């Protein structure tokens, strides 16, 4: 880069302090806006996690010989039409 006389800048922070007051104001406003955006995104992520976790429940613990039903939605069967196929398969005993 030295032979092409280019000086690439990798960040948004100024490399040196400017004597222009408007440039310093702009840089400080951008820094404040970036902090506000970061806090808003963090708060939104926390809210989404809270709403997601409200509808989740822990998986049931199965013992040996307990019976369970298997969701047949993504299982390929030999039935000619998926629409008329069984939606749930089972009951199957749990073997460990």
Image (cartoon, grey):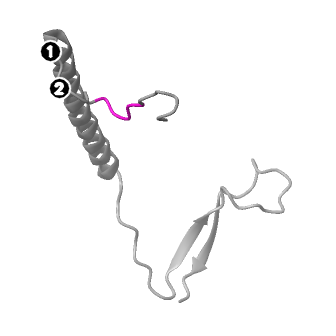
Instruction: Report the front residue among 10 and 3.
Output: 3
Q: Relative to 72, is 19 above or below?
A: above
Picture quadrant of residue 38: top left
Please give left or right for residue 60 compared with residue 76 in the image.
Answer: left
Q: Tell whether label 1 touches label 2 (CB within 8 Å).
A: no
Q: Is residue 9 one of those drawn in magenta?
A: yes
Position of residue 56 measured from the top left corner of the image (x, y, whole percent): 36, 55
Q: Residues within 10 Å of mark 2 (few under 14, many from 20)?
A: few
Q: Residue at x 57, y 69 (%)?
A: 69
- How many marks can you see? 2
Q: Which residues are magenta?
A: 8-12
Q: Relative to 48, is 66 above or below?
A: below
Q: Is residue 84 one of those drawn in magenta?
A: no
Separation of residues labelled 2 and 1 (CA atoms): 20 Å
Please give left or right for residue 78 compared with residue 51 in the image.
Answer: right
Q: Residue at x 16, y 22 (%)?
A: 28
Position of residue 51 measured from the top left corner of the image (x, y, whole percent): 30, 44
Q: For the stretch drawn in magenta, what is the main secondary structure?
A: loop
* Residue matched to label 1: 19
* Residue matched to label 2: 32
Which residue occupies the extreme right position in the image?
80
Position of residue 57 measured from the top left corner of the image (x, y, whole percent): 35, 60
Q: Residue at x 23, y 22 (%)?
A: 30
Q: Which mark is residue 65?
A: none
Instruction: Report the front residue among 24 and 15.
Output: 15
Give the structural element (helix, strand or loop) at label 1.
loop
Nearer the viewer's eye, disc 2 or disc 1?
Answer: 1
């Amino acid at each position: 880069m030295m032979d092409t006389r280019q000086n690439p800048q990798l960040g948004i922070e100024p490399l040196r302090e400017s004597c222009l007051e408007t440039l310093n104001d702009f840089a400080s406003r951008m820094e404040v806006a970036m902090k506000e955006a970061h806090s808003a995104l963090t708060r939104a992520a926390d809210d989404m996690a809270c709403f997601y976790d409200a509808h989740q429940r822990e998986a049931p613990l199965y013992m040996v010989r307990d019976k369970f039903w298997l969701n047949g939605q993504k299982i390929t069967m030999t039935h000619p039409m998926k629409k008329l196929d069984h939606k749930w398969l089972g009951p199957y005993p749990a073997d460990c």
